[in-house]
Image: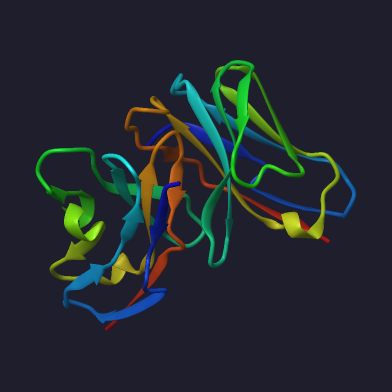
């Protein structure tokens, strides 16, 4: 069965610093992988997706993610964090449904 | 943004009462989903639909039923609400489903409290 693990429950980062969120997946075939962001009281917004091809994918809001099959990982990165990036981030893998990780909450300090 | 409307946005009710949540889409997408979100669990699939009158169970379907009589509407019913069903419920839609990739677009959620 597919599953996703996000090892970090909460990350605090200074504004302007870099951010990396970890995601590990378990899936038998070629995975379809996604990162979503959720601001308080809002639904989920798709940041980026990986289906095949180039293992480094670019998304919205300046985010990127790298697929590493050998490590079963799909980590999300941003070079310079803005205060508006404070939110909860979810990694997901898709078969007929999305299986989500438990999420990582990002706090941005001034 | 994808045209997804959830109603109501907030509801407080008592244990044992029936509750129906509605999801309405204007995108004409084939697939519709109901998730619940609880702290520490991410989102978990309750039920999904792959067409009018075609539905199937997700991983946490006990105590819930769904119906889809029109492409645009997907209803989630709690026949007899329990306190363990207090949660935030999200509807999602997708153009594609099993065997093919397709990101899902989410509604803004319904916060349901069962006292």
Would you identify the image quadrant in which residue A16 lies? bottom left
Would you identify the image quadrant in which residue A75 lies? bottom left
Relative image position of residue A45 (x, y in whole percent): 37, 48
Q: Is residue B31 visible?
A: yes
Left or right of residue B100, residue B61 in this image: right
Which residue is the extreme one toward the front?
A: A28
Q: Is residue B22 above or below residue A56?
A: above
Quadrant into which the C terminus of chain B falls: bottom right
Quadrant into which the N terminus of chain B falls: top left
Q: Is residue A64 visible?
A: no
Q: Nearer the viewer, residue A33 or B111?
A: A33
Indicate the colouring scheme: rainbow
Relative image position of residue B32 (x, y in whole percent): 52, 30
Residue under the image location 83 percent in, 39 percent down: B79
Residue under the image location 16 percent in, 74 percent down: A18
Which residue is the extreme one toward the right?
A: B16
Left or right of residue B13, residue A45 in this image: left
Q: Is residue A75 above or below residue A1?
A: below
Residue under the image location 31 percent in, 47 percent down: A34
Q: How many marks?
A: 0
Residue under the image location 45 percent in, 22 percent down: B29
Relative image position of residue A51 (x, y in whole percent): 23, 38
Relative image position of residue A4 (x, y in whole percent): 39, 56
Q: Is residue A63 above or below residue B2?
A: below
Left or right of residue B81, residue A71 in this image: left
Q: Nearer the viewer, residue A65 or B58?
A: B58
């Amino acid at each position: 069965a597919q599953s996703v693990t996000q090892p970090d429950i909460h990350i605090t980062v200074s504004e302007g610093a870099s951010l990396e969120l970890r995601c590990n997946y378990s899936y038998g075939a070629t995975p379809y992988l996604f990162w979503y962001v959720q601001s308080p009281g809002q639904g989920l917004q798709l940041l980026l997706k990986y289906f095949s091809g180039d293992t480094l994918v670019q998304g919205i809001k300046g985010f990127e993610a790298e697929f590493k099959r050998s490590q079963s990982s799909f980590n999300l990165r941003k070079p310079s964090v803005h205060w508006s990036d404070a939110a909860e981030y979810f990694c997901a893998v898709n078969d007929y449904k999305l299986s989500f990780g438990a999420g990582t909450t990002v706090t941005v300090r001034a | 943004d994808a045209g997804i409307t959830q109603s109501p946005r907030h509801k407080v009710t008592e244990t044992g009462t029936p509750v129906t949540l509605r999801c309405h889409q204007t995108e004409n997408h084939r697939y519709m989903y109901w998730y619940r979100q609880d702290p520490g669990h991410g989102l978990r699939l309750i039920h999904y639909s792959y067409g009018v009158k075609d539905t199937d169970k997700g991983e946490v379907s006990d105590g819930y039923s769904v119906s889809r009589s029109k492409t645009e509407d997907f209803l989630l019913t709690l026949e007899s609400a329990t306190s363990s069903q207090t949660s935030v419920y999200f509807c999602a839609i997708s153009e594609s489903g099993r065997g093919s990739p397709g990101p899902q677009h989410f509604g803004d959620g319904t916060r349901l409290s069962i006292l």
